[in-house]
Amino acid sequence: MTDQCVNVRCCELAVCVGAVRIIEDVSFACCEGEWIILTGPSGAGKTTLLRAINGLCPPAAGKVWALGSWIPGRSRQDAQRAWRRTGTVQQDVALFSTKSAAANVEMGLRSAGSDSASARREARDWLERFGLGDKAGEYPVRLSGGERQRVALARALAPRPQLLILDEPTAHLDNGSARIVLSAIRDLVRDGATVIMSSHHREEVEDLRTCEIVLEAGKVTHICR
């Protein structure tokens, strides 16, 4: 595993939420074209680890290498560069409530550098791919939980990011929708993207993932490649 191909590296990482240490002494690395799945019981620290990799939870100890820069120590410019190359879906999906489904996806594409016409066209294509072609003009409040999740996934995947950070991305999806989403993620991995994804349903990605990292009580107990 050469440094040139590593997109994410955690080195003796510890993360606190308030006064509570949630992550303790976590170390691993993942490369281009790898699909990492984080598993473990509820409260194991999966979400906190994803937030630390994404720069949202500063380390209490250790450090994170993500897309060319270290956390802590990352400059504002480095952070912006990393954000433009990262697709993220959190458990709360965090759509813009004042924008339509299509406009939410377009914003992800525009942030990554697409022009208006291309962003509009690609947003429609991704919504169609995820079975939401008839929902393009709807606002999040009028969408079901599963539909909102698919919009958030389309927004994250459409710019074809170098790094995807996904927190339970199929939690609210039916089996058919989950298969479509996982197929789209697989295509990005084949093109060299790195995916780090938490899931309580390891069986749905058993044949897709390249590595499984098991967390218990904030510590890595097993890494299977």
Image: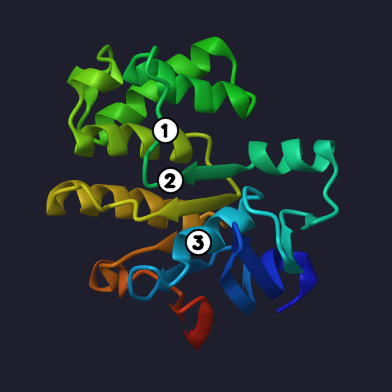
Front: mark 3 or 1: 1
Earlier-in-chain disc, 3 versus 1 = 1
Q: Which of the two residues, 210 or 73, is positioned nearer the viewer here?
A: 73
Residue 194 appears in the picture as rendered: no
Quadrant of residue 126 in the image? Answer: top left
Left or right of 104, for residue 58: right
Residue that badge 3 annotates: 196
Question: In the rendered image, which quarter contains the N terminus?
Answer: bottom right
Residue drawn at point x = 40 percent, y = 52 percent: 185
Left or right of 119, for residue 154: left
Q: Which of the two residues, 142 or 177, is positioned nearer the viewer here?
A: 142
Give the residue type that dot 1 points to. Ala
Number of callouts: 3
Residue drawn at point x = 72 percent, y = 63 percent: 64
Q: In the displayed structure, would residue 208 be above or below residue 123?
A: below
Residue 161 percent coordinates (x, y): 57, 44
Residue 85 percent coordinates (x, y): 64, 42
Residue 94's disc is: 1
Q: Residues within 10 Å of mark 3 (few under 14, many from 20)?
A: many
Left or right of 145, for residue 89: right
Residue that badge 2 annotates: 90
Q: Mark 2 and mark 1 in contact (Cβ < 8 Å)?
A: yes
Residue drawn at point x = 66 percent, y = 50 percent: 55
Q: In the displayed structure, would residue 134 be above or below residue 62?
A: above
Q: Which of the two residues, 122 or 45, is positioned nearer the viewer here?
A: 45
Residue 62 percent coordinates (x, y): 76, 71
